Amino acid sequence: MQQINNKFIRQNMYRAKYFVWIVVTLELLLIMINIIQNGDIWDSYLLLHLLLLVFSVLFLFLTSVMDRKSFDYQLVKMIIWNYYWFTLMWAATITLLDQDSYGHVTAYLINLLGVAIMYHIRLKSFILLQSIPTLYLLGGLIIVQPNTEIVLAHLVNIAFFIVISLAGSYFIYQGHYRMFEHEQLLLQKNNQLAYTNGSLQLLATRDELTAMPNRRGLYDYVEATMGNKARHVTVMLLDIDAFKHFNDYYGHLAGDKALQEVAAILKKLAGEHHFVGRFGGEEFIYLMFDVERKEALHFANKICRMVELRRIKHEASPFFPYVTVSVGLASNPFCIKDDLHQLFQDADAALYRAKKAGRNCAQLSV
């Protein structure tokens, strides 16, 4: 609701600016005509035209400053309200002055319809806005217009135009309110859809158990970071040693917990510099850019040590009393996306060599 109200205020301000520019143009023209016709004589009309011109220029200045800097919706709303109220009071005064010469109420009626069209507010607010100027005009007509028949004719015309302006203001406001409401609902639906799509994308690219990227997450990362460029890429495949024995001995729930603990170690070591994800089963993968083979091998051996130091008991292992990992590394200084499959195979072959070498170690591809 507040967002719709703020949208009304901002659009009312923009419409008011168009209205004021028209007023400024007309007032300058009328002031020039008045000066040409009357010379240096300052009469009531000239003073009123100058007053409206000054008030209009002040309105443009204030709204322009607020539009560029801090937009205070309530203050802007008050400025717009006061400007339109002033123009109606001004038009009522001009109309009362016209009774001495023209005897019509055109000035007020034109301003009243202009405000109804340009200022989109609730019906109660519009009634309140024009009530004092209208009562001021009606009371003034009774005083300044001696002809009773003319006064009655004015009352009929004013009543007719007030009904038209009230109806116009009501239907314009309701139409725009429904349009803004539909826009707001559509925006909310789009935001909900975007959130749902983001959640689905996250589910599709994340491993639920370890909260790591899965294979699809890996390929999305490759697409985002490599594109069609050649990069120095190092791949590390890690496998938990004798994990089938672990599951058979401790059960799959304990196996899931062990996977989560190993994953936490791998994520902490990767930090923000390297990609790490779950490759499948008890296998994990690191993807690193611009890392020399010697540095990568040192990092892989550090992973082996950190996992062993975690001291996750593995009494069913024929190799070590704690959970350990084996690591295979492969590197390509000029790797493109199409070369990654071969790089994965090379890392897998190196992982097999690490297993043959006794496990809990890292091996480079040949």
Image (spheres, grey):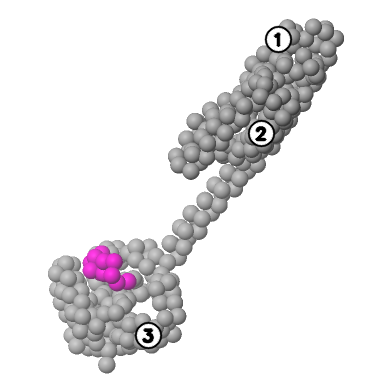
Nearer-the-camera pick, 8 or 345: 8
Judged from the image, the secondary structure of the residue bearing numbered disc 3 is strand
User: Residue 325 sits in which quadrant?
Assistant: bottom left
How far apart marks 2 and 1 lie (CA) works out to 30 Å
Label 3 to label 2, Cα distance in Å? 73 Å
Q: Would you place residue 206 above or below residue 192 in this image? A: below
Q: Residues within 10 Å of mark 3 (few under 14, many from 20)?
A: some
* Res. 335 mark: 3
Q: CA distance from mark 3 to mark 1?
A: 89 Å
Q: Position of residue 242 (x, y in %)?
A: 24, 77
Q: Are marks 2 and 1 in contact (CB under 8 Å)?
A: no
Three-letter residue code for mark 1: Gly
Membership of 139 in magenta stretch: no
User: Quick one: quadrant of the N terminus?
Assistant: top right
Residue at point 17%, 75% (across, down)? 302
Mark closer to the observer (3, 1) = 1
Please name the residue that numbered disc 2 is placed on: 28
Question: In this rendering, would 317 be left or right of 165?
Answer: left
Q: Secondary structure at mark 1?
A: helix
Residues drawn in magenta: 262-275
Q: What is the quadrant of the C terminus in the image?
A: bottom left
Q: Give the x, y percent position of residue 99.
A: 77, 15
The residue depicted at 30 percent of the width and 88 percent of the height is 349
> Pointer 1: what residue?
139
Q: Tell me, yes or no, if residue 233 can be seen here.
A: yes
How far from the left and from the top, in percent, is residue 363? 22, 86
Q: Residues within 10 Å of mark 2 (few under 14, many from 20)?
A: some
The numbered mark, 3 or 2, whose residue comes first in the sequence reads 2
Reading the chain from its start, which is encountered first: label 3 or label 1? 1
Q: Amino acid at mark 2?
A: Leu
Q: Residue at x 72, y 15 (%)?
A: 96
